Image (cartoon, helix red, strand yellow):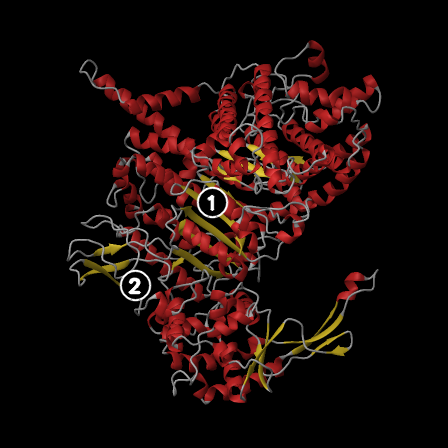
Amino acid sequence: MISTNDVRGKKRRRWEDEICMTTDKHISEKTKQTFAIEKVTKKFYELFKKERARFFTLIQGISKVSDCEWYTSLMLNRLMFIYFIQRQGFLNTKTLAALDGDIHYLRRRLKKIQEQYGYDNFYRSFLLHLFQQGLGKRERTPELEHLLGNVPYLNGSLFDQHTLEQRYPHIQIPDAAFEHIFNFFDSFDWYLDDRALSKGHEINPDVLGYIFEKYINQKQMGAYYTREDITAYISKNAMLPYVFEAVAQACPSAFLPDGPIWSLLRDHPDDYFYEAVLKGVELALPPEVEVGISDVSRRTEWNKPAPAAYALPTEIWREVVARRQRYQEVRAKMVAGQITSINDLITYNLALCRFAHDVIVSCAGPELLLAFYESIEQMTILDPTCGSGAFLFAALNILKPLYEACLVRMQALVEEYDRLDAGLLGQGWPTSAAIERLRHILQRVAQHQSRGYFILKSIMLNNLYGVDLMPEAVEICKLRLFLKLIAQITKVEDIEPLPDIDFNIRAGNTLIGFASMEELREAVQKGLSGMMSSSEVLCCIECKMKDSEQDVDHFYALQTNLTLNHEDLATAKQRLRVQLDDLCNELDPLLAAEYGIDRNLIESKEEYDERYAEWRASHQPFHWYVEFYKIMGQGGFSVIIGNPPYVEYRNVRKQYKVLRYEKESCGNLYAALIERSLALCPAGQSYLGMIVPLSICAGTRFAQLRNMIKVKTEHLHLANFEIFPSRLFEDAFQRLTILLAKHSVSTGHPQGMPLQWYESGCEVCSYHCRGIPCGCPAGWGGVVGWWGLHVTKVQRWYAQERPHLIELTTYFQSPQTGRERTLVPATSPEGKCTHQILMSQVEMHYTTEACGMKSNVFPKLASALQEIILCKVAAKSRGGCLGDILCPGKTAHFVYCQEATNYWVKATCRIPFYKKNGIVMEPAHGRFLYFNDERMAHTVMALMNSSLFYVWFATYSDGFHLSHTLVKDFPYMSHSLLRGSDLALIDELPQLATCLEAAIKLHARLSTRNTRLENKLSGEGYMIELEEYRMTETKPLIDDIDRLLAQYYGFTDKELDFIINYDIKYRMDAIIERRMRNNAMHLR
């Protein structure tokens, strides 16, 4: 199935040089450019805000403020589109062979109209004609040609008469508005490509998304612009597993573990590591560093900055060694043929796009290649909160080179088969159906002047779908997609009409509306009145849906006709729009009844009509089963990706209510979006990829959500990100988690239990629990594969590390949620085989129950060592916890800890100084733990300040709040459970606690915060003086505490080293930075 002759060796060219620059490497380079782009876009946006406000005030004829705001956005979007294409020479061209048009087209036409018709006629006498008749229609009158010049027919729905223009037919905009906006636009250079922004005033289409995300109320809407490396990472790790699984179903023999597909990883492992991972791995470690690998006591150099030859920016030797060890471990697995699943490439964070491309271009047989092409072509990708299209663009950029790779390989295979046919002429050689299918695809592509344009247009029509609550977002998303298409054109004769994607990218409320026939049936049965039965009503509705499905297919088919008449397309679109509107008008009242607006219960027609209209405007229902009937009829979307809003439900409840969601109790819309997304994709054959708040991992409110995810997903990957010292979203102090998962067929059992026994000489066994007879032949043993949870630690980074952050993300698979176990046969009393599971790949044997790991959260783990450490702590506790030894009421002996934790758990046996507006009081957001005696209080104070406790906090908290529950849950065995083993019996701990208390006080500093300065006009605010702890100065004492704890818990030297140095670079920021500065000075 794979041609080994076509596979490149170690020195072969990177595939991005062969096909295009939209690759893993390119994404990394674009990430580095993002910071430069943001500087330009910020500058543009600050000026844009003022010009937008001015333009808004000059629009006349729109009575509703919100509609005027909307029309302002629409007009500026259209004008920016014109600026992009006029700068490329699309407008008033002279020849067909080049883009030689007027790069100042709009300004010159404004002057010409003023000379011919006088002032304030530009909008109605020229601009509307340009939009609706010029760019929006193929047919032109001589008068129109004279008015507009030679402009291309673009279609694309962007220039159709807008709803607002129909609602307000007498809109007028004076010339002054355009003169101001043109002056502003002319101060920047407009480019459609991704060139480097060297001069500081270049603008590319990326700015449109940035502008939109800026001028909406981000805090209220919970919408934040997602950078390209994040969108690409999520998109490829959701899309490509779907493609590979679909192909594997069509061509299973190609995916055998020892087959040619996985041989790419065995034969060329280094080709599939990111460049950041490979930094310096070819160099031998200095002896003083290498010696620490085998001897923990000799790691004295490991926390020092590593030289640039070995290290990425800011890396210390400890990180360099860990990166190299991870590389060696994964590479060994690849060479040994142990990576034989597309999901393994996610787990080991390998270059998935590069691998997909290499598999495609290496296909030796047409059947495998055709399976790839059809899987890609038929994949439906949805962003249910698409905003300005960041994730849809990422999907498009991933798909384009894969389509291109398929077409290149198709051409080679067809030519190869044609040569074989010519040599075997007359010998009755059978025609290959797959080859003929490939030939037909190539012929269809050849009808288009630009292959790149055809590919992108096909992707937009067939693969990409988006919905957003804000109509302005939908319009910007479509505008950006159109600009991406236009950028493929190099000469006038290559111009084709833009696709009409009004039925792909939609406005509406993702959370409100019918998503399935079951939901619709339930609503019909509740709201039924009159003579028709529910089955008759549903049958009537479904007939209308099927009619609309046929019209949708006809509408999309028309768009592939290069000689299409614009009027035919407009007629088909209008017919489809009317059908869908009629269906929505039929379904909306049924849904409104669930919100208490029932025409059968409200006697007054006027009252009902008013309340219904208000509900419809505020809730903006979107019926997935109607709007995407064909897709939903097939089970749903193949892949769902996106960045849902992080909005507390209480903040939107006055605007709209969400019903039908189990996760409403979670209190945040992102939870409802995850549940909705799982309802919009078919179980067992779809993938999900989202970036959501870190609270999904451990937040108490989100326990229901986690349980649903455990039940309904498999191959679950969670990558976690801090906000200190840097954050993913510049404008959001939001700790985040990237969620990747396959939507599984629900078994009713949380994932953490094995869902499939890999076949090894017997039937596949579906039993889930240890020790249950399975009926397998006695004496059989093998390996069981567990679908499990893969997690990262909570990752921190400096700004210099940001370009490599995603490439260095490292997952760990927890034994409590899944990893390979060895099956050993044992005979039950009934004589049947019983599966006995032996733990492997760990240094101790334990079960989840014995370990005591918190099963109601998703732990954040850096490695197996971290889990083993926590399991040892739990095992020592014998089921006890810190809460067992707390006093229920106040006593004289207490530990006070601050809720805000970040890098340090700050616990003392005294109350820190705090004065607000001149009054000394207890600090806000503190926690008190009361004990019976001073010794116990000091013991717990030492424990809570330890790095061991910090590891516990980092594993199970939300990254910031040290909750009372989390503290009480810490495993702790008191003397009441087993006398002689109580931690409080260690004499040195209270002594160290006393020393630590003194050191904390010695190094503390008084800090002043005056919030009145921020409210000068009102005079409101606080003058606060507080005691700030400088915990870095106390680290040696904390290390001594951890050494004592290591003796108590039986930690190995490696485990203790892990604890003491957990997050060391960031926790000891000042000291590490000082060393880095000294090292840099030494190098100079």
Q: Secondary structure at mark 1?
A: helix
**x 74%, y 20%: residue:** 126
- x, y percent for residue 927: 60, 75
Q: Residue furthest top?
A: 142
Q: Which mark is residue 335?
A: none
Kind of residue at badge 1: Leu
Residue at the (65%, 49%) spot, across then down:
653
Image x and y of residue 344, in percent: 35, 50
Picture quadrant where residue 134 is located: top right
Would you say the residues marked 2 and 1 are in contact, meaning their CB atoms lie under 8 Å apart? Answer: no
Q: Sort mark 2 into few (<14), some (14-19) or many (20+) by Cα contacts within 10 Å.
A: few
Foreground: 907 or 615? 615
Which quadrant of the figure has residue 930?
bottom right
> Could you tell whether 383 is left or right of 342 in the image?
right
Residue 44 picture quarter: top right
Residue at horizontal 25%, vertical 46%? Answer: 257
Q: Residue 455, how many percent across, how many down?
A: 47, 28
Looking at the rendered image, the quarter that the N terminus falls into is top left
Residue 841's disc number:
2
For marks 2 and 1, the one nearer the N-term is 1
Circle 1 residues within 10 Å: few <14, some 14–19, many ≥20: many
Q: State the residue position of label 1.
A: 678
Of the 4 image quadrants, the one containing the C terminus is bottom right
Q: Is residue 274 among the parts visible in the rendering?
A: no
- CA distance separating discs 2 and 1: 33 Å
Element type at mark 2: loop
Between 534 and 614, which is closer to the camera in this rendering?
A: 534
540 in relation to 1062, above or below? above
Nearer to us: label 2 or label 1? 1
* 462 or 544, nearer to the observer: 544
Furthest toward the front, the residue is 531
Residue type pointed to by label 2: Gln
